[in-house]
Image (cartoon, rainbow, N blue to C red):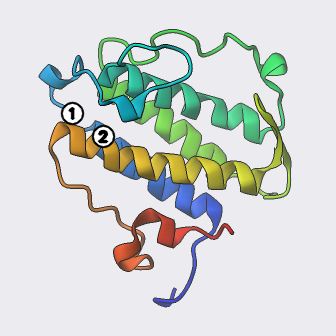
Amino acid sequence: MTAKSRLSEPEVFVLADHALNDVVAQIRDDQWAIEMPPSFATRRTDRRLTLREIVNYHAYDDSWVPDMLAGKTMAEAGVDKFKGDLLGEQPKLRFAEIVAKACAAVTGLDDLDRTVHLSFGEFPARGYLWQTNMFRGLRAHDIAKVIGINFEPSCGGVAGDRGLSGCSAGA
């Protein structure tokens, strides 16, 4: 790969998900209950979420990846399939396991134009991955700032100083 090569959306997904996992792996035990800044707000609640809740949300999001890329709707997969605490007693280990399953599904994707049925509409797999890649990269950066670590993602030498967005094959 030359310095000017662009990575595919699946390659960027794996890099972004691994970057987020690398940040999560550095969360100290005393940091899981940290209240997150208002920029981490969601539509689901008006209270400030904890770091653990944010990481659990990403575990939830990643848990859907294999079913979504297999072409299943949420109803077919089971709407409540991933509700609740996905991190358990070993949040870093559980998160890493979930990331590994999502990355395996993405790596096995053979059709970037396959329809993916999301809760907010239908998209080609390529578009789904593009959205997910941006979100993962941004959250890895944001969580790293909250827990006080440096975030220096690797893009296989492709992105330079542009962060993960420089890896994206998307529009």
Tell me the amino acid under the disc marked 2: Ile
Name the residue: 16% across, 48% down: 149
Look at discs 1 and 2 and give the one toward the viewer: 2
Q: From what the image shows, is residue 39 above or below residue 165? A: above
Q: Which residue does the numbered mark 1 point to in the structure image?
A: 27
| Front position in the image: 84 or 103 | 84
Q: Are marks 1 and 2 in contact (CB under 8 Å)?
A: yes
Location of the C terminus by quadrant is bottom right
Numbered-mark total: 2
Q: Which residue does the numbered mark 2 point to in the structure image?
A: 143
- Residue 32 appears left or right of 20: left
In this orientation, does residue 29 appear?
A: yes
Q: Quadrant of residue 145?
A: top left
Q: From what the image shows, is residue 132 above or below residue 43? A: below
In this orientation, does residue 109 appear?
A: no
| Front position in the image: 5 or 42 | 42
| Front position in the image: 136 or 63 | 136
